Each structure stands twice: as structure tokens, then as C-alpha cells.
Image (cartoon, coloured by chain):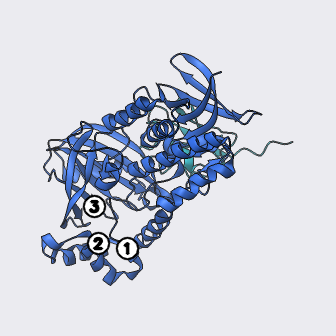
Amino acid sequence: MPNVDVLVVGAGPAGSVAAGEACRSAPALDVVLLERDRAVGAPVRCAEGVGDAGLREFADPVGAPWVARKITRVIFLAPDDTEVKVAERDVGWILDRTRFDAHLAAQASAAGAELLVGTEASGMVRDPDGRWAVSVRGPGGSTTYRARVVIGADGVETMVGRWAGLDTRVPARDMESCAQYVVQGIKFDPDAIYLQFGEDIAPGGYAWIFPKSEGVANVGLGVVALKSDGRNAKQYLDSWIARRYPRGARTGYTIGGVIVHTTIKQTYADGVLVAGDAAHMINPLSGGGIVNAMKAGRLAGRTAAAAIGEGDTSARRLAQYHEAWMKLLGDDHLKYYRIKQALEHLDDAFFNGLARTVNAIPEGKRTLGRIFAQALVRHPQMIPVAARFFV
Amino acid sequence: MLAPPRAAEVAVVQLDVCDRCGLCLPLCPPEAIHLELADLVVDPTTCTGCRKCIAPCPVGALSMVPN
């Protein structure tokens, strides 16, 4: 029964950054990072897009082997296929998540964390001395780690939060059901991401094309099942691809859930912190979560290290993590959530009309800000923070 | 203490269709879906038959069966 200071469950962006940050904050700590899958970063359950500024806080993308493509344009497609090109500088990057996640995990390892792949946490109980006894199954058999702080970075299924008694449930209206293919041999602008809205295309969500290289892209969509006509996400995607790219080779597929909710009410318990998708720290408007997860992981790692140093890992001490997160991004997500709710009332005719209005603006001047200014003329309820929409 | 009445119909995961994405897990109000050696499994004694997990599955791996 090994004793450790910090046990991190899940080696995605939240967990790896948390583990690395805990080590860097207090190098004497014993930090263990568990990954259930046999390889960090696989299978990919992600469209792999990330904003430029957020990414650079954690890693330099220029020339990095974990980058697939730089993105300098956003192309919105109205439901009737009208294209609206928006030129922005340094929009973002399409990652190779398999390599990116491995890069972050390797950084945690270099900082001193012990990384164990193919190793799954299967339950945890609190010992009388305040440590969490976490049951772990791995290639070497089963064992129990006794940890001062457990960081749950275990994604959408968030078992650590549940074991700690936190409410991590999601209302059905705030779950995007997603499906995605890697499609090869198709034509598109390889410097742009494409986003298409439409009640028959992706009700409650949007469809996307995220370039991996010339002719190869992640092509996917997310739908809210409550708004669906009875088809599941994969069936919506099959229809969309059949229409847009009937000759493309679908060389891979993935599915998954994106929680477009706000941060869970409580992200901490005695000796427990929850970060990333597990704590619903996703931008509820864009569905983006990678940078959020890394920022939360950084806060969680620092908070855990400081709390252990002070000899106080109580819920009351760890609540500082929640406060810091809400100030950093959680409160913004509450605003984005309200915009999402406003957008739910807009129909295809609105988006088609908006696309034509915006296309009257010269392309060089067509920024997201100006698009939203046009949208706001028609729908003033969308005013707050409208320009920081998609990245 | 008497056990609560079991639902007439409960959800079941078809493991040959399921991709183990975990999307259904936080959707379950009584937290009746859990992971068992990486497989998603519905506990028929706590499932209330509310069907909230059925439509959101991206590949349709959940369905209702008599309990």
C-alpha cells in the first residue's frame, strides 16, 4: 500500500499539467499520474482545435511535432451553405492529440511525477487518517495508493468526483453527442476551420471541418439529442458527409460527449480536486476544453502542493481552487452559457440572413466582432462578450 | 428495509456497439451507469427507466429492455 502525496487520475491535458505543476511547486512531493488507456493520448476523442494564446501559456506550437496545422481563418457555413470567410491573425492550431498529450505527460514525468499507463483507478474510500485509499488496477496487478490529495482529471465520466460525493451529473440539454471521422482526399481550405449550423445538420450544436493537413481533416459534429429528429450523432454525420464529401475516404472515426454546461457547483472535497471535463470546465458555447483543462490542472496542482505543504488538505482549504477557477474562467462560462441559451432560439432563416448581410462587408474587414455587431442589430440579447466566440 | 420497486424497463448497453466514450455516465440521474473493467454497465436495480441515456448515445448503443 504505497503512500503518495498527490494521485492524479487521468493523463489528459488537465491531469498531466496538474501532476507537473504539483511537482514544480513542491519538488519533494510524491506525485503519481495514472492513465487508464495503454497509451497516453489514444484513443483521440477530440476535434483537436485549440486557440493560439491559450496554448502558448503551456507550450510553444511553432515547429512542434504535436501540431498538425496552423489555422488563420474561420469559415462559417450558413445552413443553406452560404460561406462566410472571417480573416483573423493567429486564430489557433489543430493539434495531434496523441502526440500532444504524450508531450504533456512527458513534461510531468520530467518534473518528477511517476506516470503509470494502462492503470485504472476503480474506487476510493477515505481512511481514518484523512488519506484517500484508491484502488488501482494495472499491468502489475492490483494495489491501493494512499493519497493526501486525489486530483480527478478523468474526463466526461468523472468517477473520482462521484466517489468523493460531488454532483457531476449533466442535464440532457447540456450534453453534445459528437461523432467525427478523419476524412482523407477531400478539398477544403487547409488554413481554415469550417463551422456549419443548421437544424437538419447538427441540431443544438454545429458541424466542423478541422484540417489536419492538405486534403485530410477531422470532420465531425455535435448534436443535442433532445433536439434530434430521432437520428443519433453518427447518423447525422453520415448524412452530412454523404452530402459534402461523398468521395472522401473515412480513415478513422471517434465518438464522445462534450458537456456544454457550467462548472460543477463544487469542484473540491476533503482531499479531492476535480479538473477539466470532469468538472465541466468546457466553454459551453464553443465546446472547447483543452486550454481550460490545462489552466484548471495548473491551479489544481499548485493548490494541492500548497495545501499539503501547509498540512491542511481539508475541503475548506481546497475551496481556494474553486474560487481561483471561477475568477479565471468559470464566471465567464456562466456568461457564455447564457449566450448559448439565447442562440438556441435562433433558426436557420436567421443564420442564412446573417450570412448574406455579413458577406456584404469586405473580406479584409470581416472580423468576428463585426459579424456579431450585425447579429446584435437583429438580436440584442447576444450582446455580452460576443466577439470571443469560438476560440 | 424494503428494496425500492424495480423499474419495469431498464437501460442496457450493447457492448458490441458501445465505444466506451463514457457520455452516458453523467447523464444518469440515479448514477446507475458505471465502469466495470472499462465496460459501461447499467445497474438494473438502481436504473429508474427514465430513458435519459438512450437518445444521446452517439452510436445508439443503449436500449430499453424489460427488467
- The chain that hosts pointer 2 is A
Q: Nearer the viewer, residue A195 or A226?
A: A195
Please tell me which of labels 2 and 3 falls first in the chain: 3
**Mark 1 highlights which residue?**
A346
Disc 1 and disc 3 on one polypeptide chain? yes
Q: Nearer the viewer, residue B30 or A146?
A: A146
Are there few (<14), some (14-19), or many (20+) residues within 10 Å of tag 3?
Answer: many
Which chain comes out blue in the rendered image?
A
Q: Is residue A236 left or right of residue A271?
A: left
Cβ atoms at labels 2 and 1 below 8 Å apart: yes
Residue A359 screen position, x and y as percent: 17, 74
* Image quarter of the C terminus of chain A: bottom left
> Residue A196 bears which disc, if any?
3
| Residue B62 against residue A339 in the figure, above or below | above
Q: Nearer the viewer, residue A134 or A131?
A: A131
Residue A127 screen position, x and y as percent: 74, 32
Residue B32 in view in this figure? no
- The chain that hosts pointer 3 is A
**Mark 2 highlights which residue?**
A351
Kind of residue indicated by mark 1: Leu
Are there few (<14), some (14-19), or many (20+) residues within 10 Å of tag 2?
Answer: many
Callout 1: SS: loop
